Amino acid sequence: MKVKKQLAAFLLSLSLLTGMAAPVFAVDSDTSSTQSTTSSEQGSDSTETKTDKSSDSSSDKTTEDTTAEETEPQDPKNPTITIDAKASILVNAETGEIIEAKNEKKKEYPASTTKMMTALLALENCELSDVVTMKQEDIAAAGAGASNAGLKAGEQVTVENLLYCLMLPSAFEAANALARTAGGSVDNFVKMMNDRASELGCVNTHFVNPTGMHDTDHYSCAYDMYLIAREAMKNSTFQTIVNTAQKKLPETNMNPERIIYTTNELIRSSYSSIYYDNCYGIKTGHTTPAGYCLVSYAKQGSYSYYSVILGAKGGTEYAGSFTETKRLFEWAFDNFRMQTATKGGSAVTECPVRLGKGVDHVTLVTSKDVSVLLPKGAESSDLETKLDVSDSYDAPIAQGQKLGTVTYSYNGTVCATEDLIALSAVQRSTLLYALDQVSKFFHWAPVRIVITIIIVLFILYVVFSVIARRNRRIKKQQRRKRKNRKNRSNRR
């Protein structure tokens, strides 16, 4: 596999140098300085997918675009990097931690990175073997000078090959055809795009076309592009396509067999100084208002990251979207390591328990190890811990029952949030429960009102009884006095 890959890369580089790969479609607006081309050349190495990674790849070469920030000493407990772009974000794929962010939720123009959503919806709503007949409206809607794959009106192409045209040379006519096929119409497909963005939790995205052609009402942000890329990369077909450097398209009813190439310079040729062996896609983009954009994914050992660069500048050899992305990945792999915040089953905290049978507390743990990504100079003891638990819990409590959450942060940045569960079951005491029910009964508002009324009536009864008895006694005394007076009068 490695030999085949190197041979393919060599032939690709040779063809580019000698002009054998003659361009048959317009200059791709996604590229930095190298034109994307198709070729009628045929050969066994015409499809190159980067699946065989080598640690001694030429990606170790130092690029001419290396900036001063890379050579500056880093604080091992607080590494920093400055990205030369309008917006950027770097997210660890294992933990979801945001390692670097700049204007990540600010509205920017995504250009052809939009096509990630187009591809995602096409994969969700079409079969790869479905055959699509290209229409003139697909081609005309792209506009003059837009990147294309030389597809022609009336040409019959499978959805799978349209996806390769969409994601490698960033063909606009492929985007329109896929939108029409998956959505019934381009307008309906755009609605599907916006609905799907909302489902994914996008916070500042609005699409008006499936291509990324500039429109002031067509925008997104670095954070949303990460969410879309993360969802799309769950699809194995999408992974394969975006990690393909060149693809041989079969002969169709209107085009001969030919080769298309990716616009992503990080995976395009291992003989390039910008080539990055740890990179696995994903999508480029460029318009004058948007600048140079790149959504990418990289993996090295057990670490992997998503990167989004929006609004980078051009470069003398390669656009800033490529140089900044590579620099960002290298910085992350060099400066961060996974740490265990807590082991699964280990006590995180204890909370009081009411009504427990012989037990007055419950131990809360996580069900699994909680791993966090920290600067390589930091330790898990440097983490800040925040508990979200109740003041007390009532028995019975089942073993493994969720009772709260724990959040670990470093320097104010959330690293991980995990559920807290009961380490063991807590049975309920029948006696304590009965007493508690009695107490609750008498504390129930209607009962308390009734009892209050009864007490008031009883007090009134007692008061009136006392008054009545006093009145009877007074009357009896008065009658006795009158009788005594009468008796004395009779004796006289």
Image (cartoon, rainbow, N blue to C red):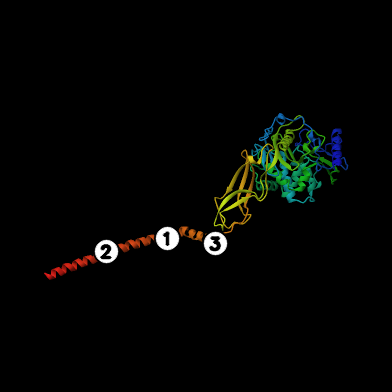
Quarter of the image where one finds residue 480: bottom left
**Measured Cα–Cα span from mark 1 to mark 3:** 26 Å
Q: Is residue 240 visible?
A: yes
106 to the left or right of 446: right
* Residue at (18% x, 68% y) in the render: 484
Quarter of the image where one finds residue 167: top right
Q: Name the mark on residue 430.
A: 3
For marks 2 and 1 on the same chain, the one whose residue lies earlier in the sequence: 1
Q: Amino acid at mark 3?
A: Thr
Q: Name the mark on residue 213.
A: none
Residue that carries the numbered disc 2 in the rendered image:
471
For marks 1 and 3 on the same chain, the one whose residue lies earlier in the sequence: 3
Frontmost of labels 3 and 2 is 3
Mark 1 surroundings within 10 Å by alpha-carbon count, few (fewer than 14), some (14 through 19), many (20 or more)? few
Q: Amino acid at mark 2?
A: Asn
Residue 384 at x, y percent in the picture:
61, 41
* Badge 3 element: helix
Q: Name the mark on residue 451.
A: 1
Mark 2 surroundings within 10 Å by alpha-carbon count, few (fewer than 14), some (14 through 19), many (20 or more)? few
197 to the left or right of 236: left
- Furthest residue toward front: 358
Residue 398 at x, y percent in the picture:
61, 57
- Furthest residue toward left: 492
